[in-house]
Amino acid sequence: MRAARGPSDVGELRVDAARLHSRLAELGEIGSTGDGGCARLALTDEDRAGRDLVVTWMRDLGLDVRVDGIGNVVAVRPGREPGPPVMCGSHIDTVATGGVFDGNLGVLAGLEVLETLERAGRSTRRPIAVAFFTDEEGSRFSPDMLGSLVYAGGMAAEEAYDLVGIDGKRLGDELARIGYLGTTPCPGEAPYAYVELHIEQGPVLEHHGDVIGAVTGVQGISWQEVTFEGQFNHAGTTPMSYRHDAGYAAAAVAVAARQIAEELGGHQVATVGALEVRPGLVNVVAGRARCTVDLRNIDEEVLEEAERRMAAEIDRLAGSEGLTVARRGLARFEPVAFDGRVVDLVEATAREHGHRVRRLPSGAGHDAQMLARMCPAGMVFVPSVGGVSHNPAERTLPEHVEAGANVLLDVLCRLADEDPAS
Ligand code: HGY
Ligand code: MN
Ligand code: MN
């Protein structure tokens, strides 16, 4: 695939940054947590409201808006020629402590690119589409990147419908309830290429003074839920040697996660994000405890070693404390490398725009890793202030938002206009 400047050279064409910031703020008000962040867990009423707002903007722009069987929304601007679109996008569902940029930036910048082209009367050879995918976060319904996984054919929609959320709700029922059980078939049409603009959510770009990240790939991810069953007992009368304390074991898993990450070093990260003990009372030995374990690494072999060490520690804790243990896999995706020529195009375009650019892997999961199963895919990162994300304080400087959106504009148009692969 060669990146050529076609008849619709965007040249000096630039996005309307004020319009983009205004939409980021307006979407961020939906599910606002009052502290600068927003909470729109997948398929909740807040998610529906966010979806409705973005779909309205898409329809107002005259895009052909389609909703598929897992609630993914794809909006297409026609090209001069028919054929698979160059696709951009991301997600608009958030975590409970979400910021206003995670996912939303990629969707709204993609919409902004199409509005900029439309207002400039600029055509492209191929169609360009902007999409938002269902349940990218995976916080309510795991695995994460669920909608794009189904779009790419990695899971049947019918299987996804039966997933049960952390609140006991069935995914298919929630999708229908919010009115986004669409009719466009899954898997979706393979795009010509896919490029996602996203905040880095980490400290690397800011630390090095870079403005654009040419993302090389996404690290592997392993999520599981661990439930220990012990014996409820009296906190005062039960000698330590008599206890079967599930709460102690779950807390020890959190300590073990940190130790395993420190022992393996490098890119290894480990998180116990959820930890619940029952009955959760000061004077009762916890007879039941549930925790989640999130392990990630860009190296699949090291990630598997981390999984082995965690499994061994869980078994040891259950044995020594006299507990039963149940494990449930929540997500498992191997590391993904993005298409080298898309990475090159992002890097070259950023340089042409005069920005310091760095190649780096993504620590977070993204829809792009699923689209990479069906077409050449890549990502454009912009810096996160303080490297903070999944936090109401999540922030990207306005000039970096604008820089990322303009690089996205140029990359999308070059892909949309390049000569057919020879
Ligand atoms: O967990 C993740 O990497 C992403 O936020 N879904
Ligand atoms: Mn995201
Ligand atoms: Mn996220």
Image (cartoon, helix red, strand yellow):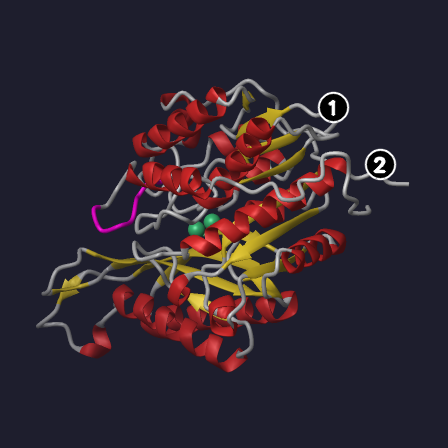
| Residue 36 among magenta residues | yes
Relative to 309, does residue 123 appear above or below in the rendering? above
On residue 421, which mark appears? none
- Residue 338 horizontal/vertical position (percent): 68, 54
- Residue 300 horizontal/vertical position (percent): 64, 65
Viewer-nearest residue: 225 or 13: 13
SS class of the residue under badge 1? Answer: loop
Q: Give the total number of marks visible in the rendering.
A: 2
Q: What residue is shown with label 2?
A: 420
The amino acid beneath tag 2 is Pro
Q: Nearer the viewer, mark 2 or mark 1?
A: 1
- Residue 351 horizontal/vertical position (percent): 65, 60
Viewer-nearest residue: 391 or 60: 60
Q: Residue furthest right?
A: 422
Q: What residue is shown with label 1?
A: 80
Q: Is residue 142 visible?
A: no
The amino acid beneath tag 1 is Arg
At x 55%, y 28%, the residue is 119
Q: Quadrant of residue 189?
A: top right
Viewer-nearest residue: 50 or 398: 398
